[in-house]
Amino acid sequence: MPFMVCIETISNVIRPGTLAVRLTANMIAGHLLLTLLGNTGPSMSYMLVTFLLVAQIALLVLESAVAMIQSYVFAVLSTLYSSEVN
């Protein structure tokens, strides 16, 4: 029985950290992709730069949608985690 208490305590302590790592990884991935695509722009022709701009705008919209979904997931999981602890 004491072993189960130890496991549950560790689980409750680690959950907020894993949630933070997940959110951070999603944010960094989107920003990294936009940065990598943006750095290739000066070496391209005019036609490819236009395509790159359209692609970056589409990725920015996608990243905004992911940010909204992640904020919803963060709110729901934070509520669930806090209700389990109390």
Image: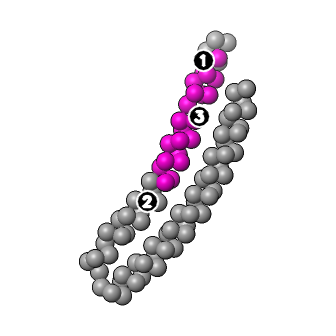
Using residue 60 as the reference point, say whether residue 80 is left or right of it: right
Residue 4, image x, y percentages: 64, 18
Residue 84, image x, y percentages: 72, 30
Span of residues in magenta: 5-27
Q: Residue at point 70% right, 39% down?
A: 79
- Measured Cα–Cα span from mark 3 to mark 1: 14 Å
- Reading the image, the residue beneath label 2 is 31
Magenta stretch containing residue 57, yes or no?
A: no
Specify the quadrant of the image occupied by residue 53.
Answer: bottom left
Magenta stretch containing residue 20, yes or no?
A: yes
Eye-nearest disc, 3 or 2: 2
Q: Residue furthest left?
A: 43
Specify the quadrant of the image occupied by residue 8.
Answer: top right
Give the label on residue 15, or none: 3
Q: Residue at point 41% right, 65% down?
A: 34
Vertical comparison of 26 with 48: above or below: above
Q: Residue at point 53% right, 35% down?
A: 17
Q: Residue furthest top?
A: 2
Q: Residue at point 40% right, 59% down?
A: 32
Q: Residues within 10 Å of mark 2 (few under 14, many from 20)?
A: few
Q: Residues within 10 Å of mark 1 (few under 14, many from 20)?
A: few
Using residue 75 as the reference point, say whether residue 13 is left or right of it: left
Dot 3 or dot 1: first in sequence order is: 1
- Reading the image, the residue beneath label 1 is 6
